[in-house]
């Protein structure tokens, strides 16, 4: 999933969509889930530990990447468990801390945090292994971390500027987006500004990474890569070989940071943290600063099933419901989707959305809702 950060929102002058307020046609999402996976507490295959990714397959099955097991769990169109794919280990078909899941048209692939890439056939047998580059670039100033697995078989990796020797939160990072396979970098998407934790450009520095700031949002799908800095309206599209395809502006309005939004973001960032780092984060949370402005966007999505569309999540959930604006890859507004309360979007089909829901006890379920929207742009 994309990086999420918090910054001062700017007054915007859109370029392609005009200067009028954003008036989006509401696409309808049925509030009643058509399918829920994970609500049968008596079925061990429906008990999830830490869901990292969810992919809706073309035949209607749903693949769920659970990093806590770790395994890919595949369910049929009725929510019945079909099989587990992969297992813990360091050999072929194995992984230890998977972070992303991809479908290449013939099988599933998993990107592990250590850079390993494992591909499987449709029936779950190991197919091939690869490795993303995890060295350092530009004279050791930038370390490489895996970010996403592309359907082409390559990995999208991030190269954030190293922090050693600098005070936390007191400088603006640079981050690279690189494409690699076979353990080496093959293409460069670009180098981008990436704030390490300032509340705004002039504000008092705050500890990183516990407040969102001007982080770079990324998404991949449909043979494209999209980027957007959270505090700026410009979306840029690239091919999976790093070639720039175009850019456009989205006229998002200014917003404010509610206490519930800040609490949700802190919870999202604390959830995967363990050990002493969790203690540090928890101590900071008790004295968190008050921030009055919000970034523009909180996420990007390029659905494979709806080619030519870009989904952009507005920052903030004032009533607990995420709002996604849908535009074409030419910057033309197509619609606006409001999800049911508490649902985090993972994938979009031709006539449905798939998301992750957590209850008060942090139990995770995967839910599918019907979507009434115009046909995909081609």
Image (cartoon, rainbow, N blue to C red):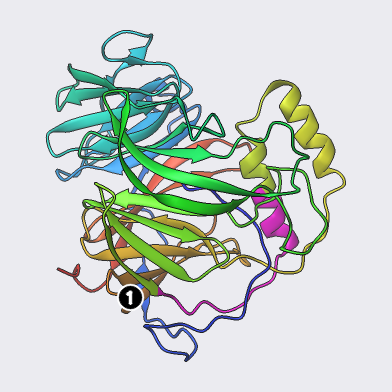
Residue found 37% across the figure and 9% down from its top: 90
Question: What's drawn in magenta, residue-wise?
Answer: 249-265
* Disc 1: which residue: 331
| Residue 340 seen anywhere in this rendered image of the structure | no
Residue at the bottom extreme?
20
Q: Secondary structure at mark 1?
A: loop
Q: Residues within 10 Å of mark 1 (few under 14, many from 20)?
A: many
Is residue 253 found inside the magenta-colored segment of the image? yes
Image: 338 above or below 212? below
Is residue 230 found inside the magenta-colored segment of the image? no
Q: Quadrant of the C terminus?
A: bottom left
Q: How many marks?
A: 1
Residue 248 x/y as whole percent: 37, 73
Tell whether 354 sits left or right of 51.
left
- Asked which quadrant contains residue 95, the reply is top left
Residue found 37% across the figure and 41% down from its top: 178
């Amino acid at each position: 999933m994309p990086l999420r950060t918090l910054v001062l929102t700017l007054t915007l002058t859109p370029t392609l969509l005009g200067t009028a307020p954003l008036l989006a046609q509401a696409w309808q999402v049925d509030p009643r889930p058509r399918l829920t996976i994970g609500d049968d507490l008596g079925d061990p295959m429906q008990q999830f530990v830490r869901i990292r990714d969810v992919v809706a397959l073309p035949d209607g099955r749903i693949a769920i990447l659970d990093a806590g097991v770790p395994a890919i769990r595949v369910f049929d169109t009725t929510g019945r468990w079909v099989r587990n794919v992969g297992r813990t280990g360091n050999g072929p078909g194995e992984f230890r801390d998977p972070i992303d899941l991809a479908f290449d048209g013939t099988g599933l692939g998993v990107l592990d945090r250590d850079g390993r890439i494992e591909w499987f056939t449709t029936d779950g047998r190991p197919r091939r292994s690869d490795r993303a580059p995890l060295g350092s670039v530009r004279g050791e100033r930038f370390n490489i971390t895996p970010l996403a697995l592309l359907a082409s078989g390559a990995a999208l990796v991030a190269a954030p500027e190293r922090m050693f020797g600098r005070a936390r939160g007191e400088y603006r990072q640079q981050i690279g987006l690189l494409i690699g396979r076979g353990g080496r970098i093959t293409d460069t998407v670009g180098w981008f500004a990436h704030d390490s934790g300032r509340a705004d450009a002039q504000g008092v520095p705050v500890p990183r990474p516990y407040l969102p700031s001007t982080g770079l949002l990324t998404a991949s799908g449909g043979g494209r890569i999209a980027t957007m800095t959270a505090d700026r309206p410009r979306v840029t599209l690239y091919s999976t070989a790093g070639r720039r395809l175009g850019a456009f502006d989205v006229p998002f309005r200014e917003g404010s940071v509610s206490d519930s939004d800040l609490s949700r973001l802190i919870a999202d960032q604390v959830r995967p943290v363990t050990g002493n780092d969790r203690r540090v984060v928890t101590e900071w949370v008790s004295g968190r600063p008050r921030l009055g402005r919000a970034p523009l966007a909180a996420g990007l999505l390029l659905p494979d099933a709806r080619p030519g569309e870009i989904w952009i999540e507005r920052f903030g959930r004032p009533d607990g419901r995420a709002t996604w604006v849908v535009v074409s890859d030419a910057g033309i507004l197509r619609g606006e989707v409001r999800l049911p309360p508490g649902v985090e979007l993972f994938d979009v089909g031709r006539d449905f959305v798939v998301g992750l829901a957590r209850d008060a006890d942090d139990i995770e379920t995967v839910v599918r809702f019907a979507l009434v929207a115009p046909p995909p742009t081609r």
